[in-house]
Amino acid sequence: MAKRYVKKKKKKRRSGFLAGAAVLFLAILVLLIVLLVTSSRRQDDPPVQAADALWDGSWYQDDLGLIDGDKALLKGMKTFEKRTGVKPFLTLLNGVDPDELDIFAQDQYDALFDHGGHLLVVYDEWEDDAYYLSARAGGTSALSQEDVAKVLNALEAAYADSANGTYAEAFGAGFARGAKAVTATVSAGGGAGLLLALGLVLLLLAFVLVLILRKRARAARREYRYMMEDED
């Protein structure tokens, strides 16, 4: 019986070691999750744009006189800048040939800005029943061509939305929607980090479960051996 008593004490010490190891792994896991979340939040923060020597501080150029009160427009454009780190500029004009609109946008961008961290959107009314949108992101802009296309799609959707009763409301809502569409790809990185953290949690749980099962199996073998010794 004394021999069995000594083995029980060893078993308790081993159980304590396993519990300590599990706590240590959990602490490391929590630290890793915090680092992943912090990293993903830092990636979501837009870059700070340097000052532009040419930019005069305006947000739009309205050659058509369509913007009557720009509060809603500026709100959407500033939301876009805050979320993406890219300062937008809107030009409303009339009569530029659609085939030459991209060239016009490029020339105007070079005339307005000193560096490539902006987004220029050009709205062109063509005849009575059509309009065209063109956009140009600078070479150092954080926006890809796919992002620019998302912004144009958001502007078109907001323009067609009857809830936006004025041009200012339509373009303001379009820039706000465009910011959400662009930054959705950024948040995907945080989702990947979360999946990695969940995978580590499952791995840790599997590890602890294996240890518990092995410990129970050893205990069952010992108990069986003791029963056989008692029968002898």
Image (spheres, rainbow, N blue to C red):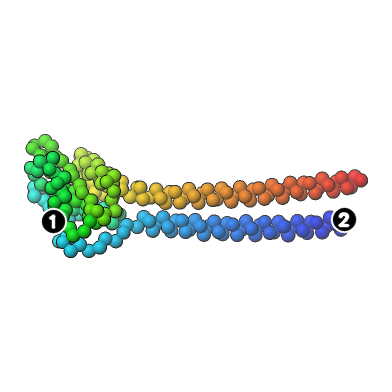
Kindly indicate the quadrant of the structure image that contains residue 39: bottom left
Amino acid of disc 1: Ala
Q: Secondary structure at mark 2?
A: loop
Residue nearest the viewer, comparing 23 with 118 = 118
Q: Secondary structure at mark 1?
A: helix
User: Residue 30: x and y, percent?
Assistant: 53, 57
Label 1, on which residue?
111
Q: Which labelled disc corresponds to residue 165?
A: none
Q: Quadrant of the N terminus?
A: bottom right
Q: Residue at x 49, y 50 (%)?
A: 196
User: Residue 153: x and y, percent?
Assistant: 25, 41
Amino acid of disc 2: Met
Q: Residue at x 13, y 40 (%)?
A: 99
Nearer the observer: mark 1 or 2; the answer is 1
Label 2 environment density (alpha carbons within 10 Å; few <14, some 14–19, many ≥20): few
Q: Report the side of 94 relative to 3 (left or right).
A: left
Q: Report the side of 46 relative to 201 (left or right).
A: left
Residue 203 seen in this snapshot: yes
In the rendered structure, which disc, 1 or 2, sits on the residue that comes first in sequence?
2
Label 2, on which residue?
1
User: Residue 87: x and y, percent?
Assistant: 23, 56
Q: Residue at x 46, y 50 (%)?
A: 194
